[in-house]
Image: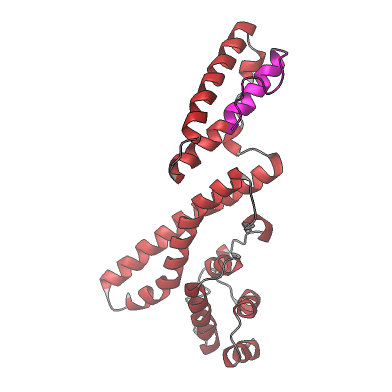
Amino acid sequence: MLEDLREWLNGSRNYAAGVQIYLKHGKDARLRNCFLEQIESDFKKTLLLKTITDLYRGNTKAIEQKENTTTIYLNGAKSWPADNQDEIVINLREQWRPLYGEMSSLQARIHDVALQGKTDINKKLEACQMAARIVLLDKKIRDIYSNKSFYEKNKRLPDQQLATIEVIGPIEKVFARAETLKRYLRDLKKKLTRAEISDIKKNKWVPKWDAYCNELRQLNNRLQKPENEGIPDR
């Protein structure tokens, strides 16, 4: 291990090579998740240099303290292709981006803050708050990755699994629900075609659009109508 670390530190310090070295020898779950993310940035380069330097110097206690809680994401689930044009995946990535940026920033700082906390009670408290925030952000990020994987497999988001009880109810109820969904979709189309729309609203409305479309298709089948009848073009 020391030979790998020494050669990297004394060489060109190539980022990709350094990541592979840390994944081979490092144990910290959150750092591994951070470096597995297929995005390179200045603060991650700085974090990688510090991490490998700490490993080389033998300061592994703080880095490896979460060895027993390792959670590794699959590379496929974590990739965000730059040329992707799927609107749902794009929206998921926009939800993920600020969360990941904040978590990575906290991960890069927490070690130093925790060390200062050995002599400063305020820094100790700050480190605890940072750790709690990292755990929360990690949960939100994993949920987004899970939604992405589910969508890529099923072509819909998990919360789009709407009840199909309506489909097998009385025909009058099915017809009334279909008309209601058509109205919802007309309203959503107006909102989604606005010249300016915030990411927050878009991330909220697009899943609703897809959910309503899926349900209306089910109802159209029950009413023996064309599957996409009543679904506006976007």
Which quadrant, please, contains the N terminus? Answer: bottom right
Q: Relative to 149, does residue 5 appear above or below in the rendering?
A: below
Task: Tell me the quarter of the picture where residue 159 sits.
Answer: top right
Give me the residue at 71% from left, 44% from top: 153
On the picture, is 1 further left or further right than 59? Answer: right
- Identify the residue at horizontal 64%, vertical 28% (top origin): 214
User: Does 186 sit above or below residue 98?
Assistant: above
- Tell me residue 32's x, y (percent): 58, 69
Q: Nearer the viewer, residue 112 or 224?
A: 224
Residue 15 % position (x, y): 59, 78
Asked whether residue 165 appears in the rendered view, the answer is yes
Q: Is residue 61 visible?
A: no
Q: Position of residue 59 (x, y in %)?
A: 49, 84
* Magenta stretch encompasses residue 64: no
Q: Is residue 67 above or below residue 214?
A: below
Tell whether 121 sits left or right of 187. Answer: left
Q: Nearer the viewer, residue 110 or 58?
A: 110
Magenta residues?
A: 210-234
Colour treatment of the image: secondary structure
In the image, taking residue 127 as reference, residue 170 lies left or right, namely: right
Q: Residue at x 60, y 47 (%)?
A: 89
Toward the front, the furthest residue is 195
Taking the magenta stretch, the answer to whether it contains residue 232 is yes
